[in-house]
Image (spheres, rainbow, N blue to C red):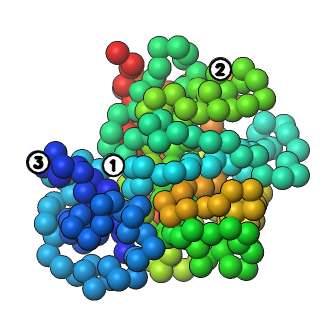
Amino acid sequence: MKLVSFRRPDGRASWGIVNGSGVIDCGSKAPSLRDALPQLASLKSDASKKPDFQLDAVTLLPPIPNPEKILCVGLNYMTHIAEGGREPPEKPIIFVRFPNSQVGHGENLIAPKASETFDYEGELAVVIGKTCRHVKKSDWQSVIAGYACYNDGSIREWQRHSGQFTPGKNFYHSGAFGPCLVTPDEIADIRESTLLTRVNGEERQRAPISDLCFDIPTLIEYCSTFTQLEPGDVIVTGTTGGVGAYFKPPKWLKPGDTVEVEVTGVGLLRNPVVAEK
């Protein structure tokens, strides 16, 4: 299934199942998609119903608009590690994003007044489907609800103020998440998918998910050891080589740009960039 959170034409927030070019409104079944994740299997019988709305008539929100935790992984593609002249880390580098730092598919990314070093980072997001702790690598598939595209938009100047990435990763509406949550049964092997990022149609990033330094089972095992993972928690697995910072001169995002993050088999996340008012 492909699942979305959205704002209906009447302005009410809801969630549902994508069917072709429309969406089946499931808002009566649970308050949010996050609340419905532990019972996803029960939704399969609804997936063939007639859509309630056309997708172009609703506003897509991040698939999980209200995650308890967004755990992001730094320096986790070998190509990105190489372009920065670094050595692979011994353990996953984890930082956090806040929910209000992200927008959904089609919404505006905001280039902040505070800096011109606004950069893109195309990534694969993994959404947790049930409460879990101390998950073994061999059991990773039993705890995930699905996958989505993510743009871990970064203000490089602020990211580099110290060894902590958090300030540069949490500017208001600097990142994007979507367009939908794709359940694992839709994808034979996520490692065979390709991650791509385009800016104004120009391809900037491309790598197979198999290029991860720490793969998804390792990340779930690691994160579930130091924190209890909950339904709707998001693990953003890292970006590949080709970020704007390493071009000469750097290719920073600016108002008027359009960024696309695509993961084959998962979807295409597209967002325009506007200036902060």
Q: Earlier in the sequence, mark 2 or mark 3?
A: 3
Q: Tell me the crowding category of disc 2: few under 14, some 14 to 19, or many 20 or more residues within 10 angstroms, Cα based.
A: some
Frontmost of labels 1 and 2 is: 1
- Residue 183 visible here: no
> Which residue is denoted by mark 1 in the rendering?
61
Q: Quadrant of residue 233?
A: bottom right
> Which residue is denoted by mark 3 in the rendering?
10
Camera-side residue of 57 and 193: 57
Question: Residue 79 location, x and y as percent?
Answer: 74, 49
Q: Earlier in the sequence, mark 1 or mark 2?
A: 1
- Residue 237 visible here: yes
In the depicted structure, whether residue 197 falls above or below residue 225: above
> Which residue is denoted by mark 2 in the rendering?
157
Which residue is drawn at the image coordinates 45% and 77% (left, top)?
Answer: 186
Frontmost of labels 2 and 3 is: 3
Question: Residue 173 location, x and y as percent?
Answer: 43, 33
Camera-side residue of 207 and 29: 29
